[in-house]
Image (cartoon, rainbow, N blue to C red):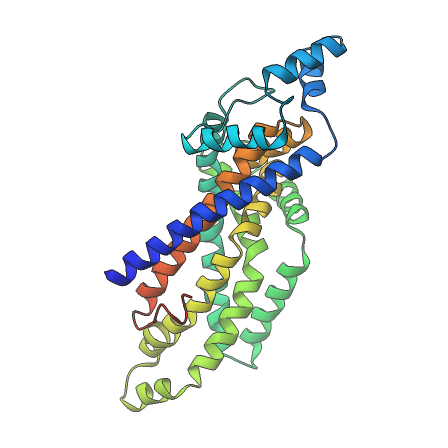
Amino acid sequence: MCRILSIIGSRMIQLVVMVLILSFVTFLLIKVTPGDPIRAILKVDDVVSTTVEEERLKKEYGLDQPILVQYSRWIWNVAHFDLGESIIAKRPVLDMIMSRLPATVALTIGGMVVLFLISVPLGILGAVYEGRWPDYISRWMAMLGASIPSFWLGLLLIYLFSLKLNLLPVMGKGTLAHFVLPSITLGIAMAPMYIRLLRERLISTLQSSYIEAAKARGLRKERILLFHALRGSLIPLVTVFGLSIGSLLGGITVIEILFSWPGMGELIVNSVMQRDYPVIQGYILIVGFLVVITNLIVDLMYLMINPQIKQGKELG
């Protein structure tokens, strides 16, 4: 229990430091990027742009203040759970993000289910039948999956299952059928790395001394594989997942745009195009928060998979 509380405390400190660093760097980078949000507002409102009107809007949104003053006001509001108001939509940023977050989380879970269903069986087959035809099939499918860009795979699935066979809906979010194609696309795009990693780890584990000892005790092969070798081999997979959560969210953005999925991906792309700074800043902050929370969950999963792990070594 003390170990768990120590891990949580450490991650909470990291969360505060990460928020401060990430928010400041993001704030500065957004300010130096090309584009003017005020001109974007005037274009949306279909108002003839004048210098007086631009100055009035800059003062209204506080954009006429020095950068440090703007940042201080923003981070103070963030500390009070206020991410500001969208310049374009005129809505609270937190409400906009939270209304899209469930769809992104649902798609992530769907992709992880597909990832698990693909990578675990193929990784096990490749390790158990090393050098034989199941191993060749496992490695070939991993190589094929790694060679196909996710957006091209999504288009291929849309063409086959929606346009040709008319089995699944193409775009949007409504029924369970709408989850199938984007979840499969996301899962297949992520699976190759996990197939290779699980296969290599299992091969190494199956040759270790404690597996030989388990065989000498007369344990069944299935029990040795599932409860001894596989359990130990899952640790590097959990590690890779924790490290790749940022790129996972980036990949989801592409898939959400492709399938018109009403998640955070569509929101951030539109916000970048319109130079909606408050939404961009809020999005990056929320994603950073999710990355830290995910890594906290990963650390706790270490203890579930192998309670003998010592925090000072594997968990850092």
Instruction: Classify residue 316 as left or right of residue 146.
Output: left
Q: Position of residue 175 (x, y in %)?
A: 45, 33
**Residue located 59% across and 70% down the image:** 139
Image point 67% across, 52% down: which residue?
149
In x, y percent, where is residue 252?
A: 56, 44
Q: Quadrant of residue 36?
A: top right
Q: Position of residue 259 (x, y in %)?
A: 59, 37
Quarter of the view holding residue 4: bottom left
Quarter of the rendering occupied by the C terminus: bottom left
In this view, the residue in front, 111 or 168, is 111
Is residue 90 something that shows in the picture? yes
- Give the residue at x 27% y 88%: 218
- Is residue 223 placed above or below 156 in the rendered structure? below
Indicate the position of residue 21 as horizontal and vertical percent values. Answer: 54, 45
Q: How many numbered marks, from 0 up?
A: 0
Q: Which residue occupies the foreground of this view, 39 or 208?
A: 39
